């Protein structure tokens, strides 16, 4: 199971925080900070995953003893997945790549500003990949097709709403 998906910039500022397990609001940022501290201090020559005993946090202990952190560093952003022991490290690295590719295709060369100004769309794309901590889709084109369908539906609904408002004003 995937417990959490985090995107944090090089300075430790969270750009996306998504938890698939209950966690108190006031405990989220300290946990993200603790995870970032470990990830950011790891050498580029080290592998992109490590187990949960590197971080001493009470919230993590509630999730079990077989927690793993899998991450990728792209430009100014760390993409971090917190998972249980049943998930494959290489599978999660691939899933991070799929998520980043989907973002990159949607935003046409995604950057940190896209994550800041289009948070809703980033969450929408993530929700096409993962739901409730389970993997839904691993094909970037299918993910983008679903997002395009949602965008088209939203535009259609907005047009219909405007037409109804115009008719209501004429009466």
Image (cartoon, rainbow, N blue to C red):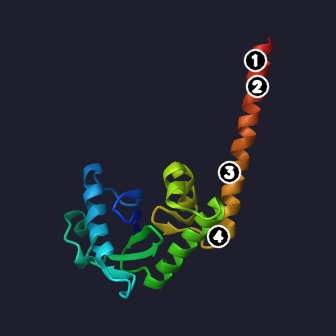
In front of the other: label 2 or label 4?
4
- Which residue, given by chain and number where applicable, does mark 2 sit on? 164
Relative image position of residue 115 (x, y in whole percent): 51, 56
Q: Residue at x 54, y 55 (%)?
A: 114
> What's the CA distance linking mark 1 and mark 3?
27 Å
User: Secondary structure beneath disc 1?
Assistant: helix
**Marks 2 and 3, the one that precedes in the sequence:** 3
> What's the CA distance linking mark 2 and mark 4?
36 Å
Which numbered dot is residue 140? 4
Relative image position of residue 105 (x, y in whole percent): 65, 65
Which numbered dot is residue 168? 1
Seen as rendered, the residue at the extreme top is 171
Q: Residue at x 75, y 41 (%)?
A: 156
Q: Answer whether labels 2 and 1 touch (C-beta < 8 Å).
A: yes
Q: Answer whether labels 2 and 3 touch (C-beta < 8 Å).
A: no
- Which residue, given by chain and number where applicable, does mark 3 sit on? 150
**Marks 1 and 4, the one that precedes in the sequence:** 4
> What's the CA distance linking mark 2 and mark 1?
6 Å
> What's the CA distance linking mark 1 and mark 4?
42 Å
User: Secondary structure beneath disc 4?
Assistant: helix
Q: Quadrant of residue 147?
A: bottom right
Q: Residue at x 67, y 62 (%)?
A: 144
Q: Nearer the viewer, residue 66 or 75?
A: 75
Disc 3: CA contacts within 10 A as few (<14), some (14-19) or many (>=20): few
Disc 2: CA contacts within 10 A as few (<14), some (14-19) or many (>=20): few
């Amino acid at each position: 199971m995937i417990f959490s998906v985090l995107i944090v910039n090089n300075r430790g500022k969270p750009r996306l925080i998504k938890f698939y397990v209950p966690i108190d609001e006031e405990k989220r940022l300290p946990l993200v900070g603790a995870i970032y501290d470990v990830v950011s201090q790891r050498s580029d020559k080290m592998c992109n995953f490590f187990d949960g005993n590197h971080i001493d946090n009470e919230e993590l202990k509630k999730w079990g003893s077989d927690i793993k952190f899998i991450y990728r560093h792209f430009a100014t952003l760390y993409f971090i997945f917190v998972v249980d022991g049943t998930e494959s490290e290489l599978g999660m690295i691939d899933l991070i790549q799929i998520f980043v590719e989907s973002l990159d295709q949607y935003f046409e060369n995604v950057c940190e500003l896209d994550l800041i100004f289009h948070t809703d769309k980033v969450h929408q794309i993530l929700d096409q990949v993962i739901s409730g901590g389970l993997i839904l889709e691993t094909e970037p084109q299918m993910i983008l097709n679903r997002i395009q369908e949602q965008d088209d539906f939203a535009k259609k609904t907005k047009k219909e709403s405007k037409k109804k408002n115009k008719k209501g004003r004429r009466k």
